[in-house]
């Protein structure tokens, strides 16, 4: 503790004590690699939610919860003699220095670019360099695994929309893409028609497959438009929630039970909610 504030070393000590078989917390002691993963995903979403709500007063706590997940995995690694938190920091720092030669020209943290402000650096070349380095890393991993694919390092645990976005983006880098958004839009119409056909056939498995194809086509359009589909859908969910709460409020003020209101009445409330925005 420095100046009455806990530091990173205190956090690492806290984790070690929590995991101590004799003095620790029973819940923490019983956790394993896989059991923590759902908490990690949840904490990442809570960080995103706080940022989107501009709840910056909540953000230190949410970021701390996310950092705690990293510390957890590092503790597992240390207990099994695989790696520790300092290895995580070293690996990350080394990788970021290597990926930013335009910032650290000598390949060391203490080296700096001189004479060219960040705004004047060619961002396109920076992006190309970044992707080339990541491709080299994928190649190295693929060599060890005896497989090679542009899609190798896209995590399967990502939310489905985010993973679809990454899959299509990675394939597009290999030229597997439409020249503009029009092709992506036409694909949506095509997939919608195929879904309608399967709905008519009442084939549940085919309906699910075609609905998935339609969603993937929408993700492709989002990519062409420069829109993050995960953020777009979260925004729509937030707007729906706000509007529906207003509909409920209108029904209560009218002395109605929302469960028995007719659709025309509910639609009127809904349109009022949209005008209110």
Image: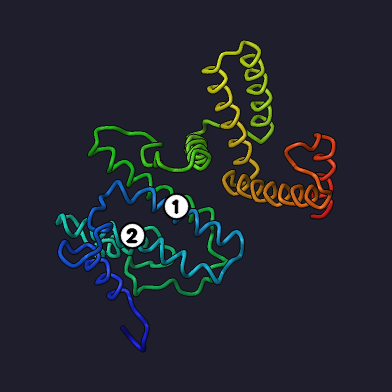
Disc 1 or 2, which lies upstream in sequence? 1
Circle 1 sits in a helix, a strand or a loop, which is it? helix
Q: Quadrant of residue 117?
A: bottom right
260 w.r.t. 128: above or below: above
Mark 1, Cα crowd under 10 Å, few <14 / some 14-19 / many 20+, is: few
187 w.r.t. 253: above or below: above
Q: Nearer the viewer, residue 58 or 113?
A: 58
107 w.r.t. 260: above or below: below
Residue, x 25% and y 65% (percent of image)?
Answer: 18
* Marks 1/2: CA–CA distance: 13 Å
Determine which residue is flagged by label 1: 42
Residue, x 27% and y 58% (percent of image)?
Answer: 28
Q: Quadrant of the C terminus?
A: bottom right
Q: Quadrant of the N terminus?
A: bottom left
Residue 144 coordinates in the image, percent (x, y): 22, 39
Q: Quadrant of residue 111?
A: bottom left
Residue 234 coordinates in the image, percent (x, y): 60, 48
Q: Nearer the viewer, residue 256 or 71?
A: 256
In the picture, the disc for residue 70 is 2
Q: Nearer the viewer, residue 166 or 277?
A: 277
**Left or right of residue 89: residue 131:** right
Residue, x 72% and y 47% (percent of image)?
Answer: 244
Q: Quadrant of residue 95?
A: bottom left
Residue 223 coordinates in the image, percent (x, y): 59, 41
Kindly report which numbered mark, 1 or 2, lies closer to the viewer in this rendering.
Answer: 1
In the picture, the disc for residue 182 is none
> Is the Cβ of the residue at disc 1 closer than 8 Å to that at disc 2?
no
**Left or right of residue 60: residue 210:** right
Residue 215 coordinates in the image, percent (x, y): 59, 32
Coloring basis for residues: rainbow
Q: Residue furthest top?
A: 201
């Amino acid at each position: 503790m420095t100046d009455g504030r806990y530091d990173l070393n205190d956090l690492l000590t806290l984790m070690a004590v929590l995991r101590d078989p004799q003095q620790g917390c029973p819940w923490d002691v019983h956790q394993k690699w896989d059991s923590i993963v759902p908490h990690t995903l949840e904490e990442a979403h809570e960080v995103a939610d706080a940022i989107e709500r501009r709840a910056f007063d909540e953000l230190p706590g949410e970021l701390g919860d996310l950092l705690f997940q990293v510390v957890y995995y590092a503790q597992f690694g240390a207990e099994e003699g695989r790696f520790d938190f300092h290895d995580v920091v070293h690996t990350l720092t080394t990788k970021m220095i290597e990926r930013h030669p335009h910032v650290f020209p000598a390949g060391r943290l203490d080296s700096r670019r001189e004479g060219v402000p960040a705004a004047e650096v060619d961002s396109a070349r920076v992006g190309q360099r970044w992707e080339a380095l990541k491709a080299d890393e994928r190649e190295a991993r693929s060599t060890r695994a005896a497989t090679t694919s542009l899609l190798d390092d896209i995590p399967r645990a990502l939310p489905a929309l985010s993973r679809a976005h990454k899959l299509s983006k990675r394939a597009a880098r290999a030229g597997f893409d439409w020249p503009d958004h029009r092709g992506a839009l036409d694909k949506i119409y095509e997939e919608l028609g195929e879904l309608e056909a399967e709905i008519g056939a009442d084939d549940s498995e085919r309906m699910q497959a075609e609905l998935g194809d339609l969603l993937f086509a929408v993700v492709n359009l989002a990519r062409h438009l420069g829109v993050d589909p995960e953020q777009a859908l979260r925004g729509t969910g937030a707007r729906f929630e706000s509007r529906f709460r207003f509909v409920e409020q209108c029904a209560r003020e009218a002395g109605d039970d929302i469960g028995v209101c007719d659709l025309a009445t509910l639609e009127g409330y809904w349109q009022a909610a949209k005008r209110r925005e």
